Amino acid sequence: MALLEVDGIDVSYGAVQVIWDVSLSVEEGETVALLGANGAGKTTVLKTICGPLTPAAGDIRFRGESIGDLPQDEVVPKGVAHIPEGREIFQDSTVRENLTLGAYAHRDGMEERRQEVYDLFPRLEERAKQRAGTLSGGEQQMLAIGRGLMSDPELILLDEASLGLAPVLVDDVFDAIEQINDEGRTVLIVEQDVHNALRVADRGYVLESGEVSLSGSAEELSEDERVAASYLGG
Ligand SMILES: Nc1ncnc2c1ncn2[C@@H]1O[C@H](COP(=O)(O)OP(=O)(O)O)[C@@H](O)[C@H]1O
Ligand SMILES: [Mg+2]
């Protein structure tokens, strides 16, 4: 049994269906990439896994337990953290306060986990008392990831973590993803940066117009001419 099983889901916004019979799985300890062009449905799939959206058909299981119909505040305590696109951090709270708020579902061991986050992103420790809204874009992204880690998740869903960052920070974010995975957490990343995503991922799925068009190991996808033609500038 995979840690996460997405089994044939359809998802609609009102009357408009945007996800069609999507299945994917993530094994414990893996990093899996969900790839695809803008508008393909990547964010919609993540939001359906973590709570805000509900599948119209199909099922989502975490450790074998159906979570498709659960709201986000019931999914997080089960061990799933979602780091949304656009870094929805609390702008007027400090870095430290943002991290504390991220631990709402798991207060035990909070201080150790905060230190884990500071070890991963030393800049956040230096800026612990600074208001989050005054951080640079890259630092805000680090804080968003750090806040997600504060719930001590087994599975992290990361939506476009590298979008809009300077190249040097993009490398930092992907290095952090690798380190988070090395520390034993399972990761599902949504990325338009296919090159870097396949560098850190074990496997990947390609979404096209709301359907899975391709899946395979990171190596297979990197070498696939359709992936190269669409996303790798090949
Ligand atoms: N809140 C919404 N209401 C209606 N349609 C939406 C909404 N969010 C996304 N969509 C549509 O769903 C499709 C998939 O969007 P999205 O999941 O955001 O794609 P991606 O993350 O791959 O860029 C797009 O056609 C988009 O316009
Ligand atoms: Mg998106």
Image (tube, rainbow, N blue to C red):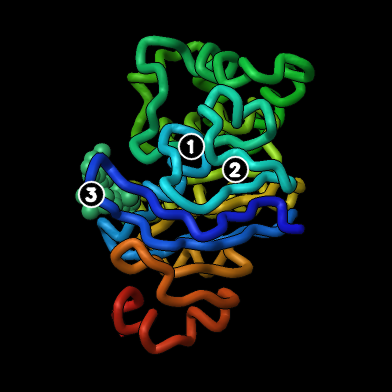
Find out if the beta carbon at label 3 lies less than 8 Å from the nearest ligand 1 atom.
yes
| Mark 3: secondary structure | strand
The circle drawn on residue 83 is 1
Dots 1, 3 in contact, CB < 8 A: no
Instruction: Locate residue 100, reporting x and y percent.
Output: 59, 14
Mark 3: amino acid: Val
Q: Give the CA separation, mark 1 to mark 2.
A: 8 Å
- Looking at the image, how many numbered discs can be counted on the residues? 3
Q: Position of residue 82 (x, y in %)?
A: 52, 37
Tag nearer the camera, 3 or 2: 3
- The reply to whether the C-beta atoms of the residues labelled 1 and 2 are less than 8 Å apart is yes
**Label at residue 196:** none
Circle 2 Cα neighbour tier, 10 Å, few/some/many (<14 / 14–19 / ≥20): many
Residue for badge 3: 16
Vertical relation: 66 (above or below) 39: above
Residue corresponding to mark 2: 156
For the C terminus, which image quadrant? bottom left
Q: Amino acid at mark 2?
A: Ile
- Asked if 207 appears above or below 90 in the picture, the reply is below
Give the amino acid type for the residue marked by disc 1 in the picture.
Answer: Ile
